[in-house]
Image (cartoon, helix red, strand yellow):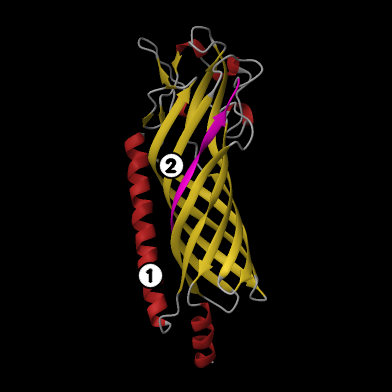
Amino acid sequence: MYLKLRKQMNQHIKTLVLLAIALTVSSIAQAQIVKGEVFAGSTLTQVDGDECYGFRKFGVHAGAGALVPVTKWMDIGLEVLYNQKGARKRDTLSSSSTFARTYKLNLDYVEVPLMVYFTDKDRYSLGIGVSYGRLVRLIEEENGIGTGIEYGDGNLSYKPGYSSSVDITRVGDVDGYRDGTAVLDIDKLGFDINELENSNSYKPHAANIIGDIRVRLWQGLHIEARYEYSLVRLRTRLFYRDQNHLTEPIIIHRQFNNCITLRLVYIFNERRVKDIKEEIK
């Protein structure tokens, strides 16, 4: 399963590279009309499904990109970003569990968003897009102690000596529950939940959907608010009544990145692009 996912992600990377080449060729064909961008800001994140509620984790968001004009009011953008995500909690994870007093999760990604921007009156822009992310740094701590988390498929597994016909990679989709929603009625899973081992990994590859609003502040300087959510799960996780995992699991969650970013954007060549457009007309 993991090898299949990795093969699919590699294919997505090749597709993005080809698209980047196509955008470059397109810009050259249009008298080299291209606008460069640099980004700097902060990301406020949480991981849905980790029992740590609230946007409590701050991270660095920085990178560069290029905008290729398609029409007078639409641009296509390709970005390369370093984006820090994760979760943080200072006290107990939930009211029903003493799983940990403190919790910290660092998920640092190199991301490649592909965006489409729609601009009104040369001042306001709305953007929508998708991104591919590669996890480059992973740290998880409970009570200040590292959990030994690894890169992997993020799936639950069976304890030695147990097996079932149930596809545990689908755990989290029971009885119409959507991804990221807790499986509360564990009796409907079709097997004894005590047969399962908790996952000890996060997926190294990620895909996200993005929406943002951009406003010009002065000349090439803009401010932008961005919302980003995972399209595929990061991990499936069991939660127990005690932090040593000695009692039975009480809940199952699929986990997803949930991010709000505020960033400054500086766009180069905007004046030059306008002049070239006028010449073409």
Marks counted in the figure total 2
In the rendering, at what x and y percent does residue 117 appear? 57, 66
**Side of 225 relative to 59 (left or right):** right
Q: Secondary structure at mark 1?
A: helix
From what the image shows, is residue 122 above or below residue 246? below
Q: Which is more foreground, mark 2 or mark 1? A: 2
Question: How far is disc 2 from disc 1 in space, using C-alphas?
Answer: 28 Å
Residue 239: x and y, percent? 54, 18
| Residue at x 47% of width, y 43% of height | 84
Tell me what residue is drawn at x 43 percent, y 82 percent: 30
Residue interval drawn in magenta? 79-91
Is 216 colored magenta in this rendering? no
Tell me the number on the disc at residue 22.
1
Kindly identify which numbered label has been placed on residue 108.
2
- Please identify the dominant SS of the magenta region: strand
| Residue at x 54% of width, y 90% of height | 278
Badge number at residue 219: none
- Say which residue appears at 39% left-offset and 81% top-offset: 29
214, above or below 203, in the image: below
Residue 84 falls inside the magenta stretch:
yes
At label 1, which amino acid type do we have? Ala
> Visible in this render: residue 154?
no
Mark 2 lies on a secondary structure that is strand
Q: Position of residue 188 (x, y in %)?
A: 59, 18
| Amino acid type, callout 2 | Asp
Is residue 275 visible in the rendered structure shown here?
yes
Q: Give the crowd class for mark 2: few <14, some 14-19, many >=20 residues within 10 Å.
A: many
Q: Quadrant of residue 216?
A: bottom right
